[in-house]
Structure formats: C-alpha cells, structure tokens
Image (spheres, rainbow, N blue to C red):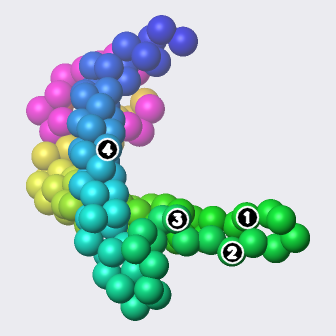
Amino acid sequence: MFKGLKGFNARGDLLITAGGLLMALAAFFLVQAIVGGLIAPLISVFIGDSTFGFNSFTIAGSEFGYGAVIEATMTFALALAVVYFLLVVPYRRLQGEGGAANTRACPECTSSISVVAKRCPHCTAVVPMGEA
C-alpha cells in the first residue's frame, strides 16, 4: 500500500490532483457568483420575482423551491464546462504534445518511462538503452 502511495507521490500525481482541485474550486465559486449575481437576476426580470432563488410553488401545504434547484443546476453545468475547457482540454493537449517522442514503454511493467532512463521508476527493473 505504501509503495503505491510513494509512487503516486513521486510521479507528481498528488500535486497535479491538488492543483486541479484548487482550480476547480476557484472556478466553481466564480461560476456560482456569476449565476447568483448576473444570470439569476436576469431571469427574475422576465419572471417578475425579485429574487430568483426564492421562487417556489405550494401544493397541499408543501413548498417546492424550484428557483434554488435551477440556480444550483446552472452553477453545476457552467462550472463543469469551465473546468473541462480550462483545465481538462489544455492538460490533455499538453500530455499529447512531446510525450510520445520523449517516452517509451518499460519491457517489464509496460509503464511509460523516459527514453534515456536506465531503470524503470515504477517497477525498478533495469532497462537497457536500446530496449523498449
């Protein structure tokens, strides 16, 4: 278990994950402010209520707050789009560029290693320079 955690940490995956999480949270709060401060009030102008998040209807004494649900749905959808287009797409593009020419497969564990590596960082197998 600890060997896997050490490998996860050593490859920088933990830093990439933490950075991605921070960027996603920042994007979420930005989108939440845009939806709550700009989009919802614009919708309220057409509906006629002053605060969109408080819109609701009542059936048999039960109140259904559809305004808050619609705001949360808009926030989720827009945050997902922002994270995808500002984080995922550029990261995938970066991974695709230059990665194939600088790496090769380890003959023991088939993980991606540097072309000039003499030992696989994943399985620690000795890899001759001409092999892979």
Residue at 25% x, 29% y: name it.
Answer: 15
Q: Are marks 1 and 3 in contact (CB under 8 Å)?
A: no
Read off the residue under disc 4: 25
Read off the residue under disc 3: 54
The numbered mark, 4 or 2, whose residue comes first in the sequence reads 4
Find out whether residue 52 is within the magenta segment: no
Is 70 or 52 nearer to us in this picture?
A: 52
The numbered mark, 4 or 3, whose residue comes first in the sequence reads 4
Q: Is residue 109 left or right of residue 96?
A: right
Residue type at mark 1? Glu
Above or below, comparing residue 87 to residue 131 in the picture: below
Q: Is residue 132 left or right of residue 72?
A: left
Name the mark nearer the viewer: 4 or 1: 1
The numbered mark, 4 or 1, whose residue comes first in the sequence reads 4
Q: Which residues are magenta?
A: 109-126
Disc 4 from disc 3: Cα separation:
25 Å
Q: Is residue 48 left or right of residue 98?
A: right
Disc 1 from disc 2: Cα separation:
6 Å
User: Callout 3: helix, strand or loop?
Assistant: helix
Q: Are marks 4 and 3 in contact (CB under 8 Å)?
A: no
Read off the residue under disc 1: 63
